[in-house]
Amino acid sequence: MGLPKYLLKLSAKTFGICEDEEMKKYAMPVIMLAVFETVAITLWLTKGNLFYLFNFSYIGISISLGVFLFIRKYRHARRVVQLLVGMYMLVYLGLICKENMQIEGFWYYLFTGVFEAATIHYAVAKIFGPLIFGRGWCGYACWTAMVLDFLPYKVPKQPRKRLGWIRYITFAAALVFVAALFLAHVGNIERIMFWAFVIGNVLYYVTGIILAFAFQDNRAFCKYICPITVFLKPMSYYSLFRVKCDKEKCISCGKCKRVCPMDVDVTDNSRKRKNGTECILCMECVKNCPKGAL
Ligand code: SF4
Ligand code: SF4
Ligand code: SF4
């Protein structure tokens, strides 16, 4: 995994961890937790709302726990995080707190000029966060993928289709929908947003499951339909965290590509690697490489 050495040293010094090999392994969960706590405390103090401290601390602890379990070689580490974060967002934030965390919610809060949960969530997880942790959101937190990943086609059984253009249509449809509500001066938009969240999620799950079986690919929805990838893909191109290949160790067996759910050519270390902006940091390639080259 491509965590720069200077960052490992920096974190070891910053958090008082001795530079012994065993401890160095745990720098990543510590860094993750530190990033989320920084966001949590900053938002809590600047916005004077304790919710932000709770929200980002919970997410940070869940993700760091998952990374820690992964380092400890626990097989279901990623699934644990997906369930902890995905269920929290879908059930608590979405259904109980009635916060539309879908893309139409982002447009809605942006239009109203309210920099609250949904807009902050997008800024952190989907717009600026990917500059650091790429599409980690898609691998560890998304409640749509949380369900899709239970389906039987964990590795695609068919070649990739040229259908990625559909994401721009769904992206535009969400924007037009919210803009139309504002232009038509429709009343009680908050309530409409809640039902848009419920109906939108049902549609996402139904479409995602149908596509997964039709294309024999659990992540077909992510590859062709999901509007959020319009933000995620360009930002994750510059991601700090990336899986990199040690060419000295690699024997070109191709196993990493065969187990990748997103068709990434992970042996190419350049930013322009095939499907590079699709990597969800699931670590299946790392776990399966027989030479420990990733
Ligand atoms: S591509 Fe969309 S649906 Fe898939 S995991 Fe990412 S945010 Fe979720
Ligand atoms: S699985 Fe490992 S050894 Fe095989 S091609 Fe990929 S990086 Fe190289
Ligand atoms: S298998 Fe490797 S390259 Fe493919 S999505 Fe997962 S982490 Fe990224």
Image (spheres, helix red, strand yellow):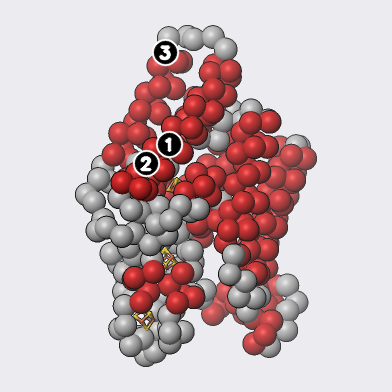
Say which element carries label 2: helix
Say which element carries label 1: helix
- Dots 2 and 3: beta carbons under 8 Å? no
Q: Please give the residue where the numbered disc 3 appears in the rendered image.
A: 183
Q: Earlier in the sequence, mark 1 or mark 3?
A: 3
The residue at 34%/70% (across/down) is 258
- Left or right of 195? Residue 57 is right
> Mark 1: which amino acid?
Val
> Mark 2: which amino acid?
Ile
- Dots 1 and 3: beta carbons under 8 Å? no
| Ligand 1 has an atom within 8 Å of the beta carbon of the residue at disc 3 | no
Q: Please give the residue where the numbered disc 2 appears in the rendered image.
A: 210
Residue farthest bottom in this picture: 248
x, y percent for residue 267: 33, 76
Q: Please give the residue where the numbered disc 1 appears in the rendered image.
A: 206
Residue 95 sits above or below residue 12 on the image? above
The residue at 53%/49% (across/down) is 146
> Mark 3: which amino acid?
Leu
Judging depth in this view, the residue of 8 and 265 nearest the camera is: 265
Residue 39 sits above or below residue 238 on the image? above
Which of discs 1 and 3 lies nearer the camera? The answer is: 1
Q: Where the C terminus falls, by quadrant?
A: bottom left
- Left or right of 116? Residue 127 is left
Q: Quadrant of ligand 2?
A: bottom left
x, y percent for residue 244: 41, 75
Q: Earlier in the sequence, mark 2 or mark 3?
A: 3
x, y percent for residue 92: 68, 37
- Dots 2 and 1: beta carbons under 8 Å? yes
